[in-house]
Image (tube, coloured by chain):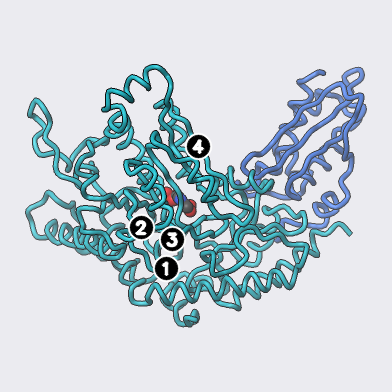
Chain colours: A blue, B cyan
Amino acid sequence: MSLYQDLILDHYRNPRNHGTLKKATHRAAGSNPLCGDTLQMDIIVKNDIIKDVKFSGSGCAISQASASLLTEAVKKKPIKEALSMEPKDVLELLNMGLSPNRLKCGLLSLETLKSALRHKR
Amino acid sequence: MLSSKIIKLDFPIFTHHPDLVYLDSAATTLKPQAVIDAEKEYLEQYSSNVGRGLYPLAETATEKFEAVRKQVSAFIGAKGPQEIVFTAGTTASINLVAQLIEKSLFSAIPADEPESRSRIKSGMTKANIVTTELEHHSNFLPWKELARAKDATFRVVPITEDGLIDLEALRNSIDDHTRVVAFSAVSNVLGTISPVSEIVAMIKSINPKTIILIDAAQAIGHAPMDVSKWNADFVAFSAHKMFGTTGVGILYGKKTLLETLRPVIFGGGMVLDACAKKTLYRESPYCFEAGTQNIGGVIALGAAIKYIENIGRENIRVHETALTAYTLKRLRETFGKHIRIIGPGEASERGGIVAFSLKDIHPHDIAQLLGERNICVRAGEHCAAPLHRKFHLNATTRVSLSIYNDEKDIDKLVARLEEISEIMSNT
Ligand SMILES: Cc1ncc(COP(=O)(O)O)c(C=O)c1O
C-alpha cells in the first residue's frame, strides 16, 4: 500500500492551521537536519486550553501532513491532553505505520508541539 | 553501449527482483555472482587466518590475500603491492591518513627549521589544511578535526556554479604552511570529474611538501585510473563501490612516504618484536594493518577487479557517459524549468551521477514514491552538507548509474517521476 493515501495527500496539499500566530503565548521550532524538514509551532494558551495553534515550515509530505492532522486534533483541547500524546497517537491520526526511516518525519510535529507547550514566551 | 541485458545475468539480485531498477550505485554497487562465489569459496573451502598459520589452508588464504594486493596495485597503476594498505573502507582510509599525518608529519614539516619554529611560537604563522566544498563528509570531517587538534587553519575551497573546484581559489589557498590538501576525483553528488593530475601538479609547484590525498570512492572502476600519473601521496577508495563487498577499503600511499610513517593502530600481525624495549614493527604496508583483516572481502575484491577488467574500464566509461547523457536529456525535455539539475551540464564532464530537485517536492517523497515501484534512488544531502548549503538546497534526489543500467531504467524513472509530479501537485 502506498504511504501516500488520500488523507495524507489532502493534508499535504491543503494544510489545516498553516501559518503563524502573532499573539502566540508558546512557540518552538524543530528540525530534522538529516531530511531538511523544519517546523515551527505557534500556540495561544488560555486557562490551560489550546485556544489556537498554527504551524509553519517546510518538509516532506509526511511531516507536513502530520503537523496538519496534529494541530487539528489538539485545538481546543487541554494542554495536559496534548502533552500526554504518544507517537502511536500520531500514527493513528496518520492512519498508518511508518518505516523507521520515515518515523522521524512523522513525529517531528509532536516533538515540536510538546516543546512549544513547555516554552512560554 | 554495453548490453545491460546480458550484464544483468551476472547479478543474481535481478533473479530475486526481476523488476528492480537500481539507480543507487554511488551508495553501493550490486554484486556479481563471481564476487559472491569468491567470498563463499574462502568461507567454505579455505577459511583460515592469513600471515600466521603454517598449514596448507592458511598458506592458501595468505597467497590469495596477497595476490589481491598485487592485483590492486596493477589495477590502479601503483609501483607495487607495498603501496597498498587494506582498511575497512574509504572512511577508514582517510581517517588513517589523518592520524598518520598527525603523528609523523605534522610538526615535522616547517617546524624542523629553526626559523619557522620561532615564527610559529610567535604566532605569526599557522599551518593550514585545505579541502573543498565538493567533499563527502568522510573527506571533510577528518581534516576539520585534524585542524582543530593541531590548531591549524581549515580552508574550504569553494566550487563554481557548475560544480567544479574553483582552481583559482585553490591556488590562492596553498602556501608554504599548507600541510595537507584533500579533494575528490569524482563528486558523489554532482558527479564532477576533477582534473586530478593538473591539480596535484599545481599544488606541488607551489608547495612540494604538501601531502595530497585523493578521495577516489566514486572514481574507482568507472574509468581507467593511474595513480602514478596522478602523482598524489595518498588515494582512498572502497571495495563495495566497485562490485566488491562492504567492509574493505584500500589506501594507496607512495612507498617512499609510507616507509617514513609510524603506525597508529597497534595489535597483532604488525609487529616483529613486541618485547624489545623499543618495539620493532613490521615494514609497511603491514605495520598499518593491525588485527585480522576482512580476508573474504579482500579475496572477493580480487574477483571484482577481474570482473571489471573483463568488461574493460574504457567500455564502462563509454556506457555510463552515454546513459548519463540520456538521463540528462530525458529529465530536461520532460520537466523543463520544473527540474533543477545541479553540477556540470555535459555528461562528458561528469561520472554517472545526476542529482536534482523537482518542483518543490521533497526528495524524500520522491524517493519513497519511486521506491514503491522498486525504483531505487537516494534522497537527502548524501553526506555532503557543505555542498548542499552552497546551492541553497536542503536535500536532492540522486540517480547514479552502473553497467547493469540501461535506457529502459531511465524511461521507467522518468515515467514514474511524471506520476509523482502529478500526485504531489497542489492543484
Ligand atoms: C566521495 C565519497 N567519499 C567517501 C565515501 C565513504 O565511503 P565508505 O562509506 O565506503 O567509507 C563515499 C561513499 O559514500 C563517497 O561517495
**Residue, x 42% and y 27% (percent of image)?**
B126
Q: Chain of mark 4?
A: B
Direction from residue B35 to residue B422 in the image, left or right? right
Spatial distance from mark 2 to mark 3, Cα to Cα?
13 Å
Mark toward the start of the polypeptide (4 vs 1) = 4
Q: Which mark is residue B223?
A: 1
Which residue lies under the disc numbered 3? B219
Name the amino acid type tagged 4: Arg
Q: Which mark is residue B230?
A: 2
Spatial distance from mark 4 to mark 3, Cα to Cα?
24 Å
Q: Tell me whether circle 2 and circle 3 mark residues in contact (CB < 8 Å).
A: no
**Residue, x 69% and y 46% (percent of image)?**
B392
Name the amino acid type tagged 3: Ala
Residue nearest the viewer, comparing B223 with A63 = B223
Name the amino acid type tagged 1: Ala
Mark toward the start of the polypeptide (2 vs 4) = 4
The reply to the same-chain question for discs 3 and 1 is yes
